[in-house]
Image (cartoon, rainbow, N blue to C red):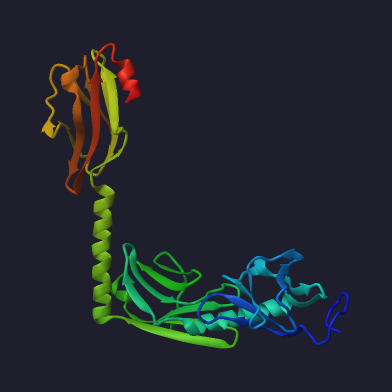
Amino acid sequence: GIYKKNRVGKGSRSRGNSVSTSPESRNHQRRHMVTNTKKETRFQWFFQKKEFPHGQYDPQTGAGLLCMEELSKEDKGVYRAEVSDERGEDDTILDLTGEALDAIFTELGRIGALSATPLKIQGTEEGIRLFSRVKYYNVSYMKTTWFHKEKRLESGDRVRAGTTLDEIWLHILDPKDSDKGKYTLEIAAGKEVRQLSADLSGQAFEDALAEHQRLKALAIIEKNRAKVVRGLPDVATIMEDKTLCLTCVISGDPIPEVSWLKNDQPVTFLDRYHMEVKGSEVTITIERVNSEDSGRYGVFVKNKYGSEKGQVTISVFKHGEEDKVLKM
């Protein structure tokens, strides 16, 4: 008999199943083969007694495939593959808990260790970085250790080590001559132990240090250059004879020089035009505005690290034109 209900027909629908991990990704695959099926036969995966939507079934080959991206502890549980039609149903169980789950993670760790790319050296804004990319990394089933000149390294003020799902890295902050030398990354996953080395000396050190200094200088420029960081709207409308106040917030070190432009020409602050600077806030005031005050205004800030301009278009309307402005 092949069916757990009705027991109609002969043979066996369930022809075995297998569990595999893919070396090309962080996927976990569960394959179930079924036979003695019909066109109307339905195949469905279940997880913790609920339908699991991420399964695939090929009626031509009888292969039912369950693929889980980035397998984690949340995938722990009991999986069931069920086939059914008018003759009855049959199923098979995968208990993905305990030793079974540990075995899969151990295998994924082994695949991750074998997939590690040669160490690369990279200059960064903060220092020099050594890293290796992996297909998969799991902190519970893989262990990494860094060495400098055969001496084990520990994370500290100037050296930081870490991992992501696809990268293992070491960051040397504020690099010095004493940081030169051979670096080794040891990756252990179960019985699999792999070592990768890179020589951070000579031209390799000089190139990485030069890139670090370049990026650090750019970061200083970006941090300290003059900017208009907040305040000006794109468009402002105001009735004639009113007072217009425009305020924006600027930043920069040293404190930026500030000027205002109207239609790309410098604004002269006399009579009705006034400018006030309070800390990082810059305000331009135009008293008793009229139609001639309409135009494109810009605040221009500049210091030794750079400059920036913020712009606003001012439209002055006459008494009685409120309705026209509201319809714009």
Q: Position of residue 120 (x, y in %)?
A: 36, 77
How many numbered marks does the figure carry?
Answer: 0
Task: Work out which quarter of the rendered image holds the N terminus and state it.
Answer: bottom right
Q: Is residue 327 left or right of residue 67?
A: left
Quick one: 303 or 65, which is closer to the camera? 65
Q: Residue 177, relative to residue 304: is it above or below?
A: below
User: In terms of image quadrants, where is residue 151?
Assistant: bottom left
Q: Is residue 274 left or right of residue 94?
A: left
Q: Position of residue 10 (x, y in %)?
A: 83, 86
Q: Position of residue 295 (x, y in %)?
A: 19, 28
Q: Tell me the residue at 40%/75% (across/down).
A: 131
Q: Tell me the residue at 27%/60% (across/down).
A: 216
User: In terms of image quadrants, where is residue 121?
Assistant: bottom left
Q: Tell me the residue at 31%/32% (across/down).
A: 233
Quick one: 177 or 34, which is closer to the camera? 34
Task: Work out which quarter of the rendered image holds the C terminus and state it.
Answer: top left
Q: Residue furthest right?
A: 6
Q: Residue 103, relative to residue 139: is it above or below?
A: below
Q: Residue 66, relative to residue 173: is it above or below?
A: below
Q: Position of residue 220 (x, y in %)?
A: 26, 54
Q: Residue furthest front?
A: 39
Q: Is residue 73 left or right of residue 272?
A: right
